[in-house]
Amino acid sequence: MTHFSDILANQHQIQNRIRYSKDFLAKTRKQFASLPGGRNADVCVFAAGSLGRFETGRISDLDLFILADGKNSPSGKKLSKLQEIELFADLIKLNEQLKLPPFSGDGRYLKVHELEDLINATGDSRDDSENLFTTRLLLLLESQALSNDALYDKALNEVLDNYFRDGKGRKDFQPLFLLNDILRYWRTLCLNYERDRGLAKPWWKRNLNLKFSRKLTVFSTALAIISRRVTTTAEFIAIAKMVPLERLSVALDAIDDQSLVSQYAKILDDYESFLAAKSYADLEDKDEEILNGFKEKAERFGNFMYSALHSNKLDPALVKYLAI
């Protein structure tokens, strides 16, 4: 029997990228710890994006999110406006010291989110208007802590406890609340892509991000939840601590559908070629041969994910909630 985790472990380019990302994360954490903001016990900063997925490349940037716990913090109060500005200044300094591209949107996405809001705003109007929904889902799906591991772990646990609150003592519990929010995140990403198609960022990068890394992040998680029959916070924490590529291989091992083995190594190669291409800023829409090649790879990747999610080894009672 072939293990999918072994196939991933033997994809040397991806493994080199994961090791590079881990080294870069350690360097970033150390650098940030040398700044006052990195030692602030009232906040936690986590990275999402390519670093959160351990897919860092030659021209990757930092996607940073900030959590605070207000009245439960060591100081017992929320950050003042001046303290927020000082923290943002340290993050900008960190970015410059690492010689990374400037923060997107001229830094307008740098914002301190209260953990209480991240939980209590689930599903209401503030969830979208204050970027709480995106922050919460990125925390669960693709995040690495840069500071304050204790607050990071607390945030993961308390956010997940809210999703699994109806499961205590129930043997028949199904995590539909969490699955629905993960699927809502995917549909939000698709809508955002259509909204932003005319922006300056090269079309091919936005399109391929959606078809490869975004799709992997969302559906590897859904597959892991269904294949491993996740019903508790602790069970999902184990999934959240994996990066999406690892999550996919573990989910496929749980399914143990050997009919998927022959395709798996190929889609890993396709995925690595996508990651490598992102590192070249000089590619443009006019590279028709390259773009057509990636369209074929993206189609193959999507077909594989579809096949995995429709494997007859999965419980159809759970799979149906991905569509209905």
Image (cartoon, rainbow, N blue to C red):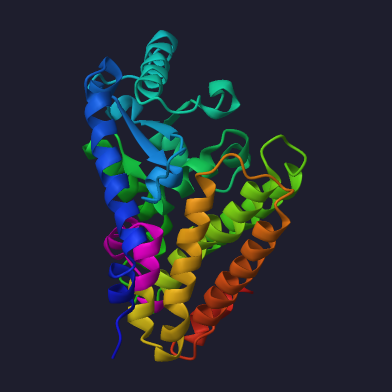
Left or right of 103? Residue 206 is: right
Is 133 above or below relative to 182? above
| Image x and y of residue 97, in percent | 34, 20
Q: Residue 303 versus residue 156: which sits nearer the camera? A: 303
Q: Residue 144 versus residue 234: which sits nearer the camera? A: 144
| Image x and y of residue 28, in percent | 29, 32
Q: Based on the picture, tell me whether residue 209 belongs to the magenta stretch.
A: no
Does the image show residue 309? yes
Residue projecting furthest to the top: 82
Q: Based on the picture, tell me whether residue 233 belongs to the magenta stretch.
A: yes
Left or right of 20? Residue 112 is: right
Residue 13 figure quarter: bottom left
Is 166 above or below relative to 194? below
Does the image show residue 229? no
The C terminus sits in image quarter: bottom right
| Image x and y of residue 238, in percent | 28, 61
Q: Residue at x 45, y 72 (%)?
A: 223
> Magenta part of the protein: which range?
227-249
The N terminus sits in image quarter: bottom left
Give the mark count: 0
Q: Residue at x 29, y 81 (%)?
A: 3
Is 186 above or below relative to 195? below
Is 138 above or below relative to 109? below
Q: Residue 276 versus residue 83: which sits nearer the camera? A: 276
Q: Residue at x 68, y 46 (%)?
A: 192
> Which secondary structure dominates the residues rendered in magenta?
helix
| Image x and y of residue 52, in percent | 38, 46
